[in-house]
Image (cartoon, rainbow, N blue to C red):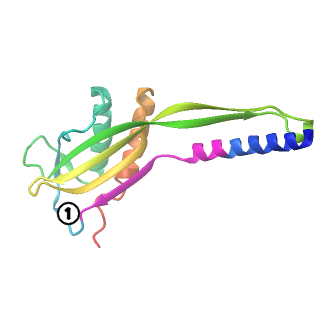
């Protein structure tokens, strides 16, 4: 009976270790979509706009988000302007959600005559950022992208900026989309 308990405990600890490894391996998820048939080569300038009804962070995080996007769009050949005649209007919104995270710890094992294992859970906040790009003249959405696990409102400023830069680089990697 004792050996069966030890085997059960060892399996639980092993499962916990696998679970932790899989949680750590899950990084930012980025997805994008675009309007088919749009010639993105005609766009050269953009202006930031607010998304009506969208959720937005405080001014500091807002500036960090815009800085990350501005950097990537500049690398794509787009120029930011405050003019209402910009080719594109760019806006974003955020969503903060909570996710259960499991933390496990184990010592010993069958080989050493038993071990102690424990698992605890905590709630972590994950942030998603949705970036929308509209054609100014047609007022149509021409490109949209979502980056998850990007914002952590309780994180420090340096880590937030690093996460944002990484996420926006991944998100805008394939912008403009290849013409099919």
The quarter of the picture where residue 60 lies is: top left
User: Residue lying farthest bottom?
Assistant: 180
Query: Which of the two residues, 23 or 77, is positioned nearer the viewer here?
Result: 23
Q: Which quarter shows the N terminus?
A: top right
Q: Is residue 88 magenta?
A: no
Pointer 1 local density, CA inside 10 Å: few below 14, some 14–19, many at least 20: few
Vertical arrangement, residue 172 with respect to residue 59, above or below: below
Question: x%, y% of residue 72?
Answer: 31, 48
Vertical arrangement, residue 71 with respect to residue 115, above or below: below
User: What kind of element bears circle 1?
Assistant: helix
Q: Which quarter shows the C terminus?
A: bottom left
At 41% from the left and 33% from the top, the residue drawn is: 160
Q: Is residue 32 magenta?
A: yes
The quarter of the picture where residue 15 lies is: top right
The quarter of the picture where residue 122 lies is: top right
Question: x%, y% of residue 95?
Answer: 35, 38
Q: On the rendered structure, is 39 left or right of 58?
A: left
Residue 74 at least partly seen: no
At 70% from the left and 42% from the top, the residue drawn is: 17
Query: Which of the two residues, 63 or 126, is positioned nearer the viewer here?
Result: 126
Question: x%, y% of residue 88?
Answer: 16, 51
At 58% from the left and 47% from the top, the residue drawn is: 25
Residue 68 at least partly seen: yes
Q: On the rendered structure, is 117 left or right of 171?
A: right
The residue where tag 1 is placed is 41
Identify the magenta region: 19-35
At 21% from the left and 62% from the top, the residue drawn is: 40
């Amino acid at each position: 009976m004792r050996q069966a308990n030890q085997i059960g405990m060892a399996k639980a600890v092993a499962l916990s270790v696998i679970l932790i490894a899989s949680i750590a391996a899950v990084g930012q998820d980025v997805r994008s979509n675009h309007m088919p048939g749009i010639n993105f080569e005609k766009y050269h300038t953009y202006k930031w706009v607010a998304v009506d009804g969208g959720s937005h962070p405080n001014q500091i995080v807002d500036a960090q988000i815009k800085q990350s996007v501005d950097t990537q769009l500049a690398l794509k050949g787009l120029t930011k302007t405050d003019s209402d005649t910009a080719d594109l209007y760019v806006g974003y919104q955020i969503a903060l959600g909570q996710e259960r995270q499991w933390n496990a710890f184990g010592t010993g094992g069958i080989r050493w005559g038993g071990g102690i294992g424990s698992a605890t859970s905590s709630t972590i906040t994950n942030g998603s950022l949705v970036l929308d790009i509209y054609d100014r003249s047609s007022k149509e959405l021409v490109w949209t992208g979502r980056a998850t696990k990007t914002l952590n409102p309780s994180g420090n400023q340096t880590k937030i900026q690093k996460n944002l830069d990484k996420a926006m680089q991944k998100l805008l990697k394939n912008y403009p989309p290849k013409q099919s």
